Amino acid sequence: MTALVQELLNTFDRLTDSEQLELVLEILRRTVDLDFPPLSDEDLIPNAEKE
């Protein structure tokens, strides 16, 4: 993770719940048409282990 991405996430964590929701919705609107490659097992495993 780059320093810029970490800084954005830290800023996100400081937002109110309603601001976080607003930001997430806007990011989803902007990314819905992007053509991302499928996630690999290496991408998915760390997220599955968080629970």
Image: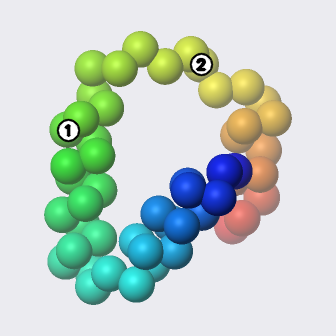
Residue occupying image coordinates x 47% and y 63%: 8
Q: Which mark is residue 17?
A: none
Q: Which mark is residue 38?
A: 2
Residue occupying image coordinates x 56% and y 16%: 37
Q: Residue 34 vs residue 41: left or right? A: left
Kind of element beneath mark 2: loop
Q: Amino acid at mark 1?
A: Arg
Tag 1 and tag 2, C-beta contact below 8 Å: no
Few, some or many C-alpha atoms within 10 Å of disc 2 (few <14, some 14-19, many ≥20)? few
Vertical side of 42 occupied by 10: above or below:
below
- Where does the image place residue 19, in percent across and percent down from the top left? 22, 74
Q: Residue 14 vs residue 37: left or right? A: left
Q: Residue 44 vs residue 25: left or right? A: right
Choose between 40 and 19: the one closer to the eye: 19
Nearer the observer: mark 1 or 2; the answer is: 1
Vertical side of 46 occupied by 6: above or below:
below
Few, some or many C-alpha atoms within 10 Å of disc 1 (few <14, some 14-19, many ≥20)? few
Residue occupying image coordinates x 35% and y 20%: 34
- Where does the image place residue 38, in percent across and percent down from the top left? 59, 19
Mark 1 or mark 2, which has the lower sequence index?
Answer: 1
- Displayed quadrant of residue 31: top left
Q: Amino acid at mark 2?
A: Pro
Vertical side of 8 occupied by 10: above or below:
below
Kind of element beneath mark 1: helix
Vertical side of 18 occupied by 45: above or below:
above
For the residues labelled 1 and 2, the Cα–Cα distance comes to 19 Å
Q: Which mark is residue 29?
A: 1
- Where does the image place residue 50, in percent across and percent down from the top left? 72, 64
- Displayed quadrant of residue 39: top right
Q: Residue 24 vs residue 37: left or right? A: left
